[in-house]
Image: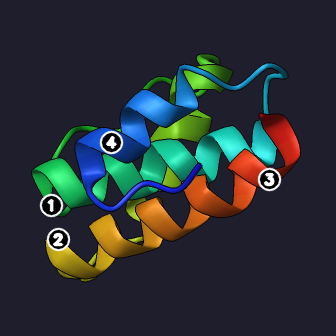
Amino acid sequence: MMSNNLEEARALTKRFTVKPNNEELLQLYGLYKQATEGDNKEDPPGAFDFIASAKYHSWEKYEGKPKEEAAQAYIDLVNELSKKYL
């Protein structure tokens, strides 16, 4: 199954039968946030909040990427992962 837009791709991730690994989840998170909100303007989380910090840096990695490009990268990643996890 392939998705053609951001919302279809997001819905497809909910149907994965196996949870993607942490690196893949962080890529998905960062690309989705960049596609929907643009550059990360939030304050960095505390040093000991490891999960929030990982998410923050994952999103920050895509700084400057236009929303449309981030959305297409997210869709492409979901389509690729669906081959492994559906």
The tag earlier along the polypeptide, 2 or 4, is 4
Q: Are dots 4 and 1 in contact, CB under 8 Å?
A: no
Residue highlighted by disc 2:
67
Residue type at mark 3?
Lys
- Secondary structure of the residue carrying tag 4 is helix
The image shows residue 67 at horizontal and vertical percentages of 17, 71
Residue type at mark 1?
Gly
The tag earlier along the polypeptide, 3 or 1, is 1
- Secondary structure of the residue carrying tag 1 is loop
In front: label 2 or label 3? 3
Report crowding for label 4: few under 14, some 14 to 19, many 20 or more residues within 10 A (C-alpha): few
Q: Are dots 1 and 2 in contact, CB under 8 Å?
A: yes
Residue highlighted by disc 3:
83
Residue highlighted by disc 1:
38
Residue type at mark 2?
Lys
Cα distance between the residues tagged 1 and 2 = 6 Å
